[in-house]
Image (tube, rainbow, N blue to C red):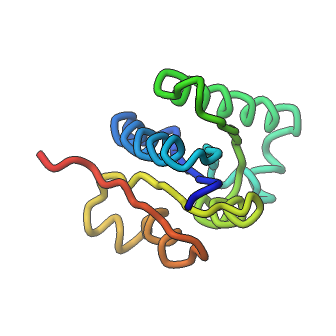
Amino acid sequence: MFKTILVPVSLSAELVQTQRALHAAITLSQLHTARLHILTVMPGFGSPWVAGYFPKPDMNKIKDEAYQQLRDIVKPVLPDSVDVKLKALDGTPYKRILQESERISADLIVIPSHSHNAMERTLLGSVAARVVERSKVSVLVVRPELP
């Protein structure tokens, strides 16, 4: 049923919740023999204001560091049998997630939902909510465990 699964993760999010989403995606990947694409998006680095402040070599170094952080998060939970691609991008998180989903022809997006209070969701909106609202493919939102 699924051939390509996209898993967007935030490097600043709760590691436990990120790992829950990764475990769900890995299980689905193994069940369907699907390829995993794991993505992190650094917000704001693509804007002209930020790009003007950081020289290009510094921007590349920041992206390389984000990629390494992503590897460090994924490696301990990823079995060797799972085919995976890692990617670090910059820009508006939900927009880049949707663009990457289309670029790789994802069948499914597995996204962690992080603890946000109602005020934060109202003012800022949630990346997961925006992805669910705008995605052309199915989205599995992995919520935090209830206490």
Q: Is residue 40 visible?
A: no
In the rendered image, the vertical position of residue 90 relative to residue 78, given as above or below: below
At x 66% / y 55%, what residue is drawn? 44
Residue nearer the viewer, 76 or 56: 76
Q: Quadrant of residue 93?
A: bottom right
Q: Quadrant of the N terminus?
A: bottom right
Q: Is residue 22 left or right of residue 120?
A: right
At x 21% / y 47%, what residue is drawn? 145
Residue nearer the viewer, 45 or 54: 45
Residue 49 in picture, x, y percent from top left: 76, 57
Q: Quadrant of residue 4?
A: bottom right
Residue 70 in picture, x, y percent from top left: 59, 32
Q: Is residue 33 left or right of residue 27?
A: right
Residue 124 in picture, x, y percent from top left: 44, 68
In the rendered image, the vertical position of residue 17 relative to residue 99, given as above or below: above
Q: Is residue 35 left or right of residue 112?
A: right
At x 34% / y 64%, what residue is drawn? 120
Q: Quadrant of the C terminus?
A: top left
In the rendered image, the vertical position of residue 52 relative to residue 85, given as above or below: below
In the rendered image, the vertical position of residue 71 relative to residue 43, given as above or below: above
At x 59% / y 45%, what residue is drawn? 33
Q: How many marks?
A: 0
Residue 19 in picture, x, y percent from top left: 40, 36
Q: Is residue 113 visible?
A: yes
